[in-house]
């Protein structure tokens, strides 16, 4: 687990630097991951893990994911693993809840091949590797310069995943994970064209909540599943920019036709106290066979 900052540096931050940054309109906080703050008494740890496991089991059931895994055991294993994560991130990327959901989902889905679009600092790659030690992992991100963890067995590319040659993979053994701030409707269409049927998305958001998300990747899965009614598009403002999701979007229509099931996982905040996660599992209709 990442240690506490040196005492003198922490005093400097609190007494000098933080007031200065506050006057400039910024927050100065230690670059400590949220899981470095945790209960340590056995009773409270047990309560947190039991609550998280209950939510995770219900989510897997709602997704139609049948597993022989012991979900409470998976949650406890993750609790012991996450302090060893080689990635320190405070802003952006996955926190405890998102990483836990991804870990349990990958353990339950048991993919032999994982395509990861959007790598950031490498935490989710590390989580996938802990869940599936023998899996082939393909990591795509236009900028890999910020990696804090580079998986020695993964294959990295700065090209968009949709332009890669996937002719050698078995779609039935593959799960794609998207955390790339690209229109989720587009990713659904691309994945289905390759025959993939199991997808996991981060940062799925409904229209009335998307303003609170960075890099709005619309149409989101929630927008696709609950299309805009009437002629008025969804509009929102973020960081001074105006965004719009059309009321009649052909990308959303095509993506919707390919989705068999979509389930947004519980954000786990009430169970664990950590920042909410926004993972959504999507199962696609398989492509019709040629001549069918």
Image (tube, helix red, strand yellow):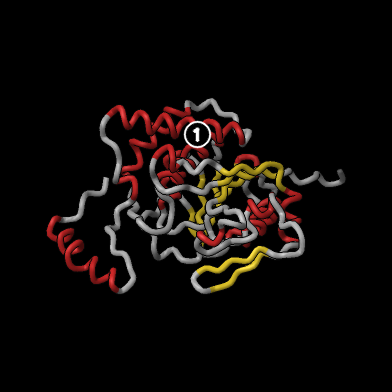
Q: Is residue 220 left or right of residue 55?
A: right
Q: Quadrant of the N terminus?
A: top left
Residue 144: give x, y in percent of width and height: 44, 63
Residue 224 percent location from the top left of the image = 69, 53
Q: Nearer the viewer, residue 188 or 168?
A: 188
Q: Residue furthest left?
A: 8
Q: Residue at x 63, y 45 (%)?
A: 282
- Within 10 Å of disc 1 (Cα), the crowding (few <14, some 14-19, many 20+) is some
Residue at x-position 51% and y-position 74%: 240
Q: As drawn, which residue projects farthest toward the right?
A: 291
Secondary structure beneath dot 1 equals: helix
Looking at the image, residue 225 sits to the left or right of residue 85; the answer is right
Q: Is residue 292 visible?
A: yes
Viewport quadrant of the C terminus: top right
Query: Can you tell which quarter of the image residue 21 is in?
Result: bottom left
Q: In the depicted view, which residue is nearer to us: 10 or 121? A: 10
In this rendering, is residue 155 above or below 232? above
Answer with left or right where residue 36 lies relative to residue 181.
left
Instruction: Give the residue displayed 72% in from the left and 60% down from the top.
Output: 251
What is the total number of numbered labels drawn onto the structure image?
Answer: 1
Residue 24 falls in which quadrant of the image?
bottom left
Q: Which residue is mark 1?
A: 55
Question: Does residue 102 show up?
Answer: no
User: Quick check: 208 above or below 283?
Assistant: below
Residue 54 at what x, y percent from top left? 48, 30
Residue nearest the observer in this picture, 258 or 287: 258
């Amino acid at each position: 687990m990442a240690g506490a900052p040196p005492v003198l540096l922490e005093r400097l931050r609190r007494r000098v630097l933080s007031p200065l940054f506050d006057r400039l309109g910024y927050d100065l906080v230690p670059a400590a991951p949220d899981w470095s703050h945790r209960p340590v008494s056995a009773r409270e740890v047990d309560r947190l893990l039991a609550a998280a496991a209950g939510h995770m089991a219900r989510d897997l059931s709602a997704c139609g994911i049948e597993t022989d895994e012991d979900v409470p055991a998976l949650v406890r294993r993750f609790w012991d693993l996450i302090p060893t994560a080689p990635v320190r991130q405070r802003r952006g990327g996955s926190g405890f809840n998102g990483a836990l959901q991804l870990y349990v989902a990958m353990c339950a889905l048991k993919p032999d091949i994982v395509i990861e679009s959007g790598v950031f600092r490498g935490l989710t790659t590390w989580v996938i590797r802990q869940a599936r030690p023998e899996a082939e992992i393909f990591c795509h991100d236009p900028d890999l310069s910020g990696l804090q963890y580079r998986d020695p067995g993964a294959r990295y590319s700065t090209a968009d995943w949709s332009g890669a040659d996937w002719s050698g993979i078995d779609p039935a053994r593959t799960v794609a994970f998207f955390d790339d701030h690209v229109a989720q409707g587009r990713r659904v269409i691309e994945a289905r064209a390759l025959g993939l049927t199991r997808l996991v998305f981060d940062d799925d958001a409904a229209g009335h909540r998307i303003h609170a998300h960075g890099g709005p990747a619309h149409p989101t899965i929630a927008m696709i599943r609950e299309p805009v009614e009437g002629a008025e598009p969804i509009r929102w403002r973020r960081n001074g920019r105006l965004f719009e999701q059309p009321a009649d979007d052909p990308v959303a229509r095509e993506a919707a036709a390919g989705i068999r099931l979509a389930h947004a996982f519980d954000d786990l905040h009430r169970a664990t106290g950590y920042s909410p996660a926004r993972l959504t599992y999507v199962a696609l209709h398989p492509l019709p066979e040629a001549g069918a």
